[in-house]
Structures are given as structure tokens and as C-alpha cells.
Image: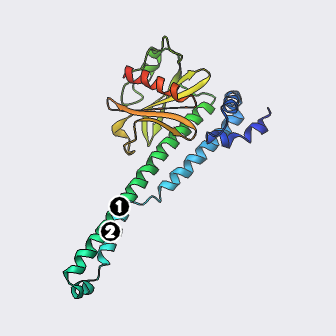
């Protein structure tokens, strides 16, 4: 297929909306075509720039407090005095319930939005890495080569599982960043599917508490958990069972 036809599908690829067969074929093309790979990376960077721009207008806790004070001041003192304590007993609790309801809804929406941004950014990192001509900086299927390579490059250490007897193969790794926090990005393969494993220090992340267990994000199966002060994310287009199997190997190794 000509490059022009592949470029028509890059937006779908970046958003994780291609059928598995087409996605695998396009990925293979990107690994051999620097022009299309550069176009794919441009699309990922544009998508991330738009997401980052949206963060600038996220309502802050100060704004929420200001709204609460404004509502509280809206209770007219003259009306309160003329109506007596009975009016206050009915109205003031109603205002408090309204304030707490608004605050709770704001918090829930903010947490959900933050979680969606995290998984979206990880999906973008996964796609951008696989679209790159050099997806990993250390190439090896030997964990005893890959793990030491990260020493001095990230502020923590981690364990990798033994893969003998499993269907997984370690491809290699590279240093990556989430919320300006450095971490490890490992690539595994299973039956021609690539899976990204991200590891970050839990303390360095400003993300809200993310739910443990499997999550479907942007057509990718993902799983996340915290262990020994580290946050693990497993992202890929492999089946949910494969994601769960690799996650179990990593948890047992950790």
C-alpha cells in the first residue's frame, strides 16, 4: 500500500481506532518508513499539546472555595432577621447541602478527568514509541542486560520477571516521562503484539489514586497497580488475558 493511503489512516492509528489487522500492518510499515513514522509522531505530539492546553483552564480548588463563599454571602441578613430562626433552620442546611453537592460533583469530575488524561498520555506514549524507527534505546531479550541499563538514568530500581515457559519476549527499554517524572518504559511482545510496561515512582506522580486492575482506554487494554512504592502501567492492543498474564508475571517479580 502506498504511503499516501497509509497516511489517511494515521489519525485512526494514533487514536487506537484501527482494526487489529490494519493496525499491525500499519505498525510494520511505520518501522520501515521514516516519513510516515515522522507524520505519526507529529500527530501524537499535536494531540498531547491540545491535552496540555486544556489543563490550563481546569477549575482550581481556590475557585471552588470562592463559589462556596459567594453562595454563603447570598443569604440576606434582613430576610433572616424578619423570618426568625425557623427560616434559618430550613434554608441554611439546604444551602450547605447544595455547597457540598457541588463540591462533591466537582471533585468526582476532576478525578475522572485526571485519570482519563493519564491513560490517554500513556496510550500516546505507547503509540509514539511503536511508530518510532528506534522504539527502544537498549535492545535485548535478557533482563540482566535491560535492567542494569537503567541504573543512573532513573531514581529507582525494579525487578523484571523470568519469561521462560511463557509466550512473552522482552524487546528492550527506554527512559520515558509522565508528568515530568522519569520512569522506565519496557516493550514486550506476544504473538506479534507489542505491550508497553511503564514503571514510575509513586511519590513522583501528581495523579489521583488510580483504580487498580484492568481498564480499557482508547481501544487499548491496560492494567495498573502499586507495589513497593512503584506504579506499574501495562498498555497494549493484546488481549485482556495477555495483559493480565504479563501483569501477574511483573507483580510476582516485584
Residue 137 lies, in percent from the top left, at: 53, 25
Q: Nearer the viewer, residue 222 or 203?
A: 222
Label annotation for residue 75: none
Q: Which mark is residue 68?
A: 2
Task: Identify the residue at horizontal 47%, vertical 27% (top origin).
Answer: 244
- Colour scheme in the image? rainbow
Whether residue 13 sits left or right of residue 249 in the image: it is right
> Residue 164 in the image: x percent, y percent?
48, 11
Q: CA distance from mark 1 to mark 2?
A: 9 Å
- Quadrant occupied by the N terminus: top right
The x, y position of residue 141, in whole percent, is: 52, 16
Location of residue 104 (image quadrant): bottom left
In the image, residue 179 above or below residue 175: below
**Mark 2, other Cα within 10 Å: few <14 / some 14–19 / many ≥20:** some
Residue under the point 34% across and 67% down = 98
Against 213, residue 61 (above or below) is below
Q: Quadrant of residue 75?
A: bottom left
Residue 74's image quarter?
Answer: bottom left
How far across and down, in percent of the image, does residue 134 sit? 60, 27
Along the polypeptide, which appears first: circle 1 or circle 2? Answer: 2
Read off the residue under disc 1. Answer: 103
Is disc 1 in contact with disc 2, using a CB cutoff of under 8 Å? Answer: yes
Residue nearer the viewer, 8 or 213: 213
157 with respect to 188 (left or right):
left
Q: Residue at x 41, y 50 (%)?
A: 111
Q: Nearer the viewer, residue 252 or 230?
A: 252
Amino acid at each position: 500500500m502506498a504511503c499516501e493511503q497509509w497516511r489517511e489512516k494515521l489519525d485512526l492509528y494514533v487514536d487506537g481506532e484501527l482494526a487489529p489487522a490494519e493496525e499491525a500492518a500499519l505498525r510494520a510499515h511505520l518501522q520501515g518508513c521514516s516519513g510516515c513514522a515522522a507524520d505519526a509522531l507529529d500527530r501524537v505530539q499535536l494531540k498531547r499539546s491540545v491535552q496540555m492546553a486544556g489543563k490550563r483552564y481546569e477549575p482550581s480548588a481556590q475557585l471552588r472555595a470562592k463559589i462556596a463563599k459567594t453562595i454563603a454571602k447570598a443569604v440576606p441578613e434582613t430576610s433572616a432577621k424578619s423570618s426568625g430562626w425557623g427560616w434559618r433552620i430550613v434554608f441554611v442546611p439546604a444551602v450547605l447541602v447544595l455547597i457540598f453537592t457541588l463540591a462533591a460533583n466537582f471533585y468526582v469530575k476532576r478525578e475522572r478527568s485526571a485519570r482519563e488524561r493519564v491513560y490517554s498520555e500513556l496510550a500516546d506514549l505507547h503509540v509514539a514509541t511503536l511508530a518510532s524507527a528506534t522504539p527502544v534505546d537498549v535492545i535485548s531479550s535478557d533482563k540482566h542486560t535491560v535492567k542494569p541499563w537503567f541504573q543512573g538514568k532513573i531514581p529507582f530500581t525494579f525487578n523484571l520477571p523470568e519469561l521462560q515457559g511463557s509466550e512473552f519476549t522482552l524487546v528492550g527499554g527506554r527512559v520515558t516521562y509522565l508528568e515530568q517524572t522519569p520512569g522506565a518504559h519496557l516493550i514486550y511482545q506476544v504473538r506479534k503484539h507489542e505491550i508497553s510496561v511503564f514503571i514510575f515512582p509513586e511519590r513522583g506522580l501528581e495523579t489521583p489514586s488510580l483504580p487498580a486492575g484492568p481498564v480499557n482506554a482508547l481501544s487499548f487494554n491496560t492494567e495498573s497497580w502499586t507495589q513497593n512504592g512503584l506504579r506499574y502501567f501495562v498498555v497494549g492492543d493484546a488481549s485482556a488475558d495477555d495483559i493480565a498474564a504479563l501483569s501477574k508475571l511483573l507483580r510476582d517479580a516485584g
